Image (cartoon, rainbow, N blue to C red):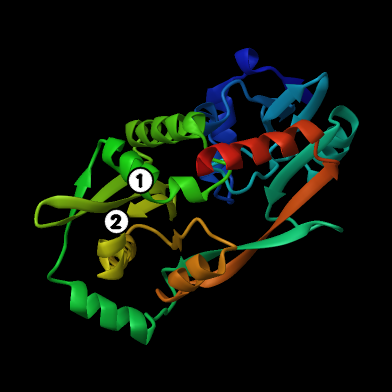
Amino acid sequence: MKKVEHKDLDKHAWDKCIRKSDNENIFMYSWYLDAVAPGWEGLIQDDYSGVFPLTTKTQLGKSSLFQPIFTREFEPFGTLPLKVVLEYLDSEFNHALFRTSIQIEQSEKRVHQIIELEKEFKLKTNAKRILKKSVTLFEIREANDPKELIKLFQDTAYTKIDSLGSQELERLETLMNTALKNDAGKLKYIYKKNKCVGGAFFLLDKSRITLLKSACLDEAKREGAMYQLINQTIQESKENYKTFDFGGSNVSAVREFYLKFGATDREYFEITIGKEPGWKKKAKSLLKRVKKK
């Protein structure tokens, strides 16, 4: 196994390793990593028979590995064992944090929500009622320009998420445009009387469709706009996908919303090596204060 710098990566070979695996993890494709973690490097086993991304930062002479925003989890793909990855991270980084589907001792459990589309699932009674009442209120259109969704997100949810700054919004827009260019994204807007009141962006993998980000004006949300958009997308996805992935949330209110569509929890795990550097804690605190002004 060796570390390969970004400029020396064979991205075609990297993506081939991801694509041929039985696992699915759209966050691991090179184009995705380019968008959310520019300059990323890789751990490579043999001739790209196994891979793992290294998304790192160096501050005050100390290096750390982090889970980039807009990614949920990373996996050692192919022939590269998790044990070997952990040993490398422990030896090379002062602090490392990433999330994965593999549970180890002292990892922290997290959940996100999915629907297995080939199995039976049912809408909750409350969701059925809201969908029935709102069906004539909204029109849903597919699009290829995410600027309006970014603006909606900035006007609604942006200030509530401490880890988001202007750079993250730029990367989110870049990611959406890159996914659309690679035929790995779907963008939908929802209109009421020809006014855009909400939207959502979905990531498309081999057999999984994943909700990346959504936003909706408060009044339209109360009237059931997001119920209409998500339910329509779920129903359309049955033909071509096996799993509808809500992207996930440990936030109870968001989780409860997803469960109304018949979703179930899927567990994944956060692994931490070493202590979080002091500069990172201070940066989080500063960003939180700035966004409240």
- Residue count near mark 1 (Cα–Cα under 10 Å), binned few <14, some 14–19, many ≥20: few
- Residue count near mark 2 (Cα–Cα under 10 Å), binned few <14, some 14–19, many ≥20: some
Q: Residue at x 29, y 35 (%)?
A: 147
Q: Residue at x 50, y 40 (%)?
A: 293
Q: Nearer the viewer, residue 210 or 237?
A: 210
Instruction: Determine whether 212 is above or below 176 in the image.
Output: below
Identify residue for label 2. 217
Q: Residue furthest left?
A: 193
Percent position (x, y) of residue 221? 30, 64
Percent position (x, y) of residue 191? 17, 55
Identify residue for label 1. 155
Q: Which of pointers 1 and 2 lies earlier in the amino acid sequence? A: 1
Instruction: Determine whether 242 is above or below 196 in the image.
Output: below
Q: CA distance from mark 1 to mark 2?
A: 8 Å
Whether residue 38 can be seen here: yes
- Residue 254 relative to residue 183: left or right: right
Q: Quadrant of the N terminus?
A: top right
1 and 2 marks in contact (CB < 8 Å): yes
- Residue 106 relative to residue 248: left or right: right
